[in-house]
Image (cartoon, rainbow, N blue to C red):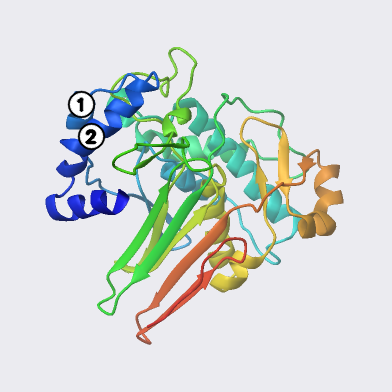
Amino acid sequence: MLADTLEAIGKEGPRAFYAGPIATDIVDYLRERGGHHTLEDFARASGEYVTPISASYRGRTVYECPPNGQGVIVLMILGILSRFTLWGDSLDADNLHLIVEASRLAYAARDAWLADPVTSGVKVNDLLAETLLDQLAARIDLSRAMPGLPSFGGAEHRDTVYITVVDEQRNAVSFINSLFFHYGSGLMSPRSGVLLQNRGEGFSLFEGHPNAIGPSKRPMHTIIPGMVAENGRVTMAFGVMGGHYQATGHAHFLSRLFDHRLDMQSAMDLPRLFPVPGTASLEVEALLQERVGAELQRRGFEFETPTYAIGGAQAIRIDWDRGTLLGASDHRKDGLALGY
């Protein structure tokens, strides 16, 4: 079933999926289960080529995909961090405090404003405005945790796959995809074999919110591939899986590379923490709890032990001077760095 579907798409292109027997099979199946999808919905659907958004961090240009994904939140976190000096041990309590608070501030902005730009009018330049980043950075007090920040109830985002490839001509691909949760919606159209995702859970149910559920809208989503460039050339393609964690994961990984001068594998392997959006808690891996837990708790942070791995990173770095590639893959996920 699925092999026939993939063969049809390979021969006929995207329209083989969005029109004809495959679309009919999916729509009929969904409507039988109470859905409101129509063939017209599928016919109107299309992908789009977008212009990446970017910001400078420690002399490099970091590229992310624009909304309705949370790439702009990575750039906000990095913009806040750029107002501080992070030095010494990357696991020092002050450095971790800054990462946590910058993430909490940026995620509060995400949960208030991030949505489909076609319907919400979200402006990337406003979120990355120097005055806003100055104001957010000024709220950080290294002596204590910030009081609670506003957030709206959102679904948990999981089950993502990330791949990066660089070929001999140094064409770089940073690719991420997700069905959203365990086997997506758990629904498979019977004749096409297509497993259906359920990213509609990423919508807000609060009336009037920019990300409120509605027709012809795309939900805020968490999956974000990344790239870094120096002197106008890509020097790294990277991604960090892990649902909500991805924006913090990108920023923390880049900070460990460019603030603390770690190599890619070390930056991935070190223990992690994550301020869970909409809560007062930090998910903190056990090794990090042992090392700095008491100090962070003294500052007012609340801990919870994660029930699964926090994220999973992969990256390829391009050394243009030596003509070599260097890969790294996170031990928290299936995957490997493979050369050819």
Task: Look at the picture and state if 159 lies above or below 270.
Answer: above
List x then y, in percent, for residue 333: 58, 61
Task: Look at the picture and state if 81 lies above or below 43.
Answer: below
Is residue 273 shown left or right of residue 241? right
Element type where label 1 sits in the image: helix
Q: CA distance from mark 1 to mark 2?
A: 7 Å
* Residue 262 visible in rendering: no
Task: Look at the picture and state if 189 lies above or below 255.
Answer: above
* Residue 240 visible in rendering: yes
The residue shown at (34%, 37%) is: 190
The residue shown at (74%, 38%) is: 145
Q: Which residue occupies the foreground of this view, 67 or 202? A: 202
Which amino acid type corresponds to the residue marked 2 in the rendered image?
Ala
Asked whether disc 1 touches disc 2, contact meaning CB atoms under 8 Å apart, the reply is yes
List x then y, in percent, for residue 86: 63, 59
Question: For residue 191, what is the image quadrant?
Answer: top left
Q: Residue furthest left?
A: 12
List x then y, in percent, for residue 173: 33, 63
Comes first in the chain, label 1 or label 2: 2
Q: Which residue occupies the foreground of this view, 22 or 127? A: 22
Disc 1 target residue = 39
The residue shown at (43%, 73%) is: 317
Which amino acid type corresponds to the residue marked 1 in the rendered image?
Leu
Disc 2 target residue = 23
